[in-house]
C-alpha cells in the first residue's frame, strides 16, 4: 500500500466500520445481569441489595430518598462490594460521567465499552506502526482483524468492564514494551515509565485480574537480557504502582474482595452438590471440563482457530490448536531474536492467565471462573500472532498459500457470522442473555410518571430469589432490586411514594388513593428480569 491517501482512507473506513458494528442496535435490548449491577453502581451509587434499611417494608420511600447523597466513601464501598471478580472503579467512574452528560439510556451506558474498545483498536494500529514503521499493509491488516474480533464487538455492546480493562492492559503492555525497547537503544524512558504506571494503575482499578498482566511482564523481563538500569526503573515504577493498590486492598474497600471470592466459591460448590451442573457455566473442575474450557479459551485467541471447537467438536478443535501451535513454532524459528521477542511476550500474556485460571478452577472445584473474559487481556497479541503466521504461510510453497487463503477466507466469514445474532438478540457467543425486549425498568418508570397522582403509592414486588444461596442474601427482609432499578430512572425532585410488598413476586402496581390497584408491569415469573 504505497499510496498514503489510500492508507489514510483505509484507516478511517475501518474505524467507521468498527463503530457501526459496535453501536448498531446498542440500546434496543434491555440490560442483563452484571450490566444492571454496573448501572446501579455507577449511576445509582449502590449495588444489588443495597439501601435495604431504607427500602425494606413496611417503610415507604421516594426518589428523593433514593438519590440522597451518602458520600464518596459509601459509593466506593458499594463499588467494592459490587463484583466478586474485582471492582470496576475506572469503568464505573466513566459510566457515571456518561450518564451525567448524556443520560441514562441503555445505549449511553453501553457506549463506555464502545469508547474503550475503539481506543484499543487505535492503539493496536499505532503499535503495529511502531513495530514496522515502513509498512502500511501490516497495521491495516492488524486493525481489520481487530475490527471484526467477535469478543471485542460483543462486549462493546455490554455495560461491563471488559473492554475497559483490555484497553488499559494493552496500553500497559505497549508502554512496557516501548520502555524496554528504548532502554536497549539507550534512549530516554522516563515518559514511557510514567505512562506505564498510569495505565497499569487504571488497569488494576478496572479489575483485579489485570494483575496477571503485570506478572506476565515480569516473566518476560526475566527471559530478556536487560540492563541493571532497566531493572532499577522497572522495580521503582512497580513499587509506585503497588503502593496505592495495596493500600486500597488492605485498608480500603478492596478488603472485601477475598471474603467475597471465598463466598462465591462456596456458593458454586454447594450448588453443584445439591442441584447438579449447568452446562457451560457451573460445572465441576474435572479433567474433561478443564480440557474443554482450555481448548475454547486458547482457540478463541486466534483467527486461525477461533470457534473451530464449536463447529467441529473439541477433539478436532484441539487437533487444530496443536497444528496451529506447530505452525507458530516453525514461524518463530524463522524470525530474528529481536523480532521474535515481541511474539514471545505475547505468548506469555496469552498462556499465563490461562494457566492461573486452570489452577484457580482446580482450587475452587468449579469452572465458573474459567472463561475467555477472564483471560482476554491476551487477545491483542492473538491478533498480532495470527497476522504474523499468515505472512509466514504466504511465503511458503504455492499449495500452502492456496490452502491458507481458502481457510482464512472461511474463518473470516465465520467470524462475521458469529456477530449476526448480536443484532437480533438471538443465542450468541460469550453471553447467556438472548430474546430480550427493551429495558422494562425504563418502561415502568415512564408509566409511573404518566399515571401517578398525589395520594397514590407505587408497590414493587419482592421476588426473594437467591439462586446460589448467597450468604449476604439469606438475611435480607425483602428483595429491593426492582425498586432500585426503577428509581434509577426517576429524578431526585420526583415525589412518588413507593413501598415493597413481600407477598408480591412479579407485579409492579399503582395503588390509587381510593384503594384501587392498577397493574403497571408484570415480570411474568422472572421472564423479563434479565
Image: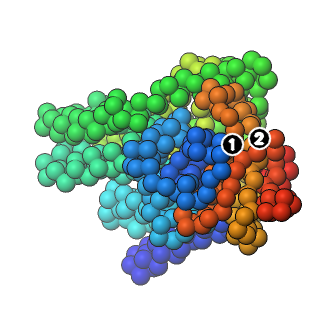
Q: Quadrant of residue 291?
A: top right
Quarter of the image with the N terminus in it: bottom left
Q: How many labels does the image show?
A: 2
Query: Is residue 428 visible to the viewer in this orientation of the structure?
Result: yes
**Secondary structure at numbered mark 1:** loop
Pointer 1 local density, CA inside 10 Å: few below 14, some 14–19, many at least 20: some
Q: Which colour scheme is used?
A: rainbow
Q: On the image, numbered disc 2 is attached to which residue?
A: 502
Q: Quadrant of residue 447?
A: bottom right
* Residue beneath the point at 73% across and 58% down: 457
**Secondary structure at numbered mark 2:** loop
Pointer 2 local density, CA inside 10 Å: few below 14, some 14–19, many at least 20: some
Residue 82 position within the rendered picture, expressed as x and y whole percent measured from the top left:
53, 41
Of callouts 2 and 1, the N-terminal one: 1
**Numbered circle sitting on residue 287:** none
* Residue beneath the point at 40% across and 50% down: 71
Nearer to me, 291 or 48: 48
Query: Is residue 30 visible to the viewer in this orientation of the structure?
Result: no
Residue 309 position within the rendered picture, expressed as x and y whole percent measured from the top left:
71, 39
**Numbered circle sitting on residue 57:** 1
Residue 143 position within the rendered picture, expressed as x and y whole percent measured from the top left:
49, 62
Nearer to me, 88 or 334: 88
> Marks 2 and 1, how far apart in space?
8 Å
Q: Do labels 2 and 1 touch, CB within 8 Å? A: yes
Amino acid at each position: 500500500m504505497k499510496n498514503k491517501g489510500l492508507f489514510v482512507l483505509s484507516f478511517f473506513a475501518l474505524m467507521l466500520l468498527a463503530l457501526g458494528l459496535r453501536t448498531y442496535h446498542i440500546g434496543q435490548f434491555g440490560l442483563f445481569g452484571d450490566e444492571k449491577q454496573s448501572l446501579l453502581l455507577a449511576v445509582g451509587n449502590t449495588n444489588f441489595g443495597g439501601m435495604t434499611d431504607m427500602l425494606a417494608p413496611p417503610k415507604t420511600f421516594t426518589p428523593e430518598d433514593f438519590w440522597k447523597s451518602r458520600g464518596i466513601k459509601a459509593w466506593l464501598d458499594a463499588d467494592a462490594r459490587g463484583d466478586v471478580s474485582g471492582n470496576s472503579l475506572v469503568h464505573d467512574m466513566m459510566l457515571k460521567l456518561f450518564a451525567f452528560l448524556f443520560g441514562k439510556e441503555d445505549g449511553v451506558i453501553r457506549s463506555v465499552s464502545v469508547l474503550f474498545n475503539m481506543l484499543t483498536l487505535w492503539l493496536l494500529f499505532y503499535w503495529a506502526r511502531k513495530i514496522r514503521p515502513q509498512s502500511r499493509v501490516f497495521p491495516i491488516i492488524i486493525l481489520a482483524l481487530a475490527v471484526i474480533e467477535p469478543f471485542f464487538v460483543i462486549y462493546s455492546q455490554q455495560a461491563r468492564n471488559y473492554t475497559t480493562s483490555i484497553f488499559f492492559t494493552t496500553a500497559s503492555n505497549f508502554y512496557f514494551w516501548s520502555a524496554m525497547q528504548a532502554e536497549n537503544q539507550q534512549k530516554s524512558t522516563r515518559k514511557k515509565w510514567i505512562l506505564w504506571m498510569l495505565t497499569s494503575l487504571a488497569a488494576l482499578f478496572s479489575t483485579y485480574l489485570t494483575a496477571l498482566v503485570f506478572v506476565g511482564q515480569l516473566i518476560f523481563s526475566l527471559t530478556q537480557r536487560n540492563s541493571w538500569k532497566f531493572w532499577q526503573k522497572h522495580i521503582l515504577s512497580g513499587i509506585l504502582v503497588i503502593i496505592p493498590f495495596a493500600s486500597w486492598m488492605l485498608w480500603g474497600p478492596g478488603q472485601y474482595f477475598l471474603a467475597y471470592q471465598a463466598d462465591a466459591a462456596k456458593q458454586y460448590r454447594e450448588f453443584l452438590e445439591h442441584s447438579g451442573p449447568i452446562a457451560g457455566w457451573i460445572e465441576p473442575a474435572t479433567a474433561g471440563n478443564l480440557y474443554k474450557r482450555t481448548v475454547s479459551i486458547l482457540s478463541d485467541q486466534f483467527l486461525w482457530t477461533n470457534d473451530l471447537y464449536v463447529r467441529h467438536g473439541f477433539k478436532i478443535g484441539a487437533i487444530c490448536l496443536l497444528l496451529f501451535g506447530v505452525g507458530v513454532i516453525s514461524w518463530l524459528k524463522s524470525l530474528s531474536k529481536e523480532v521474535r521477542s515481541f511474539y514471545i511476550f505475547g505468548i506469555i500474556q496469552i498462556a499465563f492467565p490461562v494457566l492461573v485460571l486452570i489452577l484457580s478452577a482446580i482450587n475452587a472445584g468449579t469452572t465458573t471462573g474459567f472463561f475467555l473474559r477472564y483471560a482476554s487481556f491476551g487477545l491483542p497479541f492473538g491478533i498480532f500472532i495470527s497476522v504474523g503466521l499468515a505472512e509466514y504461510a504466504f511465503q511458503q510453497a504455492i499449495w500452502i498459500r492456496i490452502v491458507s487463503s481458502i481457510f482464512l477466507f472461511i474463518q473470516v466469514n465465520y467470524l462475521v457470522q458469529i456477530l449476526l445474532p448480536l443484532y437480533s438478540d438471538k443465542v450468541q457467543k460469550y453471553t447467556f442473555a438472548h430474546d430480550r425486549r427493551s429495558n422494562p425498568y425504563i418502561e415502568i418508570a415512564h408509566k409511573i410518571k404518566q399515571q401517578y397522582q398525589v395520594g397514590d403509592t407505587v408497590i414493587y414486588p419482592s421476588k426473594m430469589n437467591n439462586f446460589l444461596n448467597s450468604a449476604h442474601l439469606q438475611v435480607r427482609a425483602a428483595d429491593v432490586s426492582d425498586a432500585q432499578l426503577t428509581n434509577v430512572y426517576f429524578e431526585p425532585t420526583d415525589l412518588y411514594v413507593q413501598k415493597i410488598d413481600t407477598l408480591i413476586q412479579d407485579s409492579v402496581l399503582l395503588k390509587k388513593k381510593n384503594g384501587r390497584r392498577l397493574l403497571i408491569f408484570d415480570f411474568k415469573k422472572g421472564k423479563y428480569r434479565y
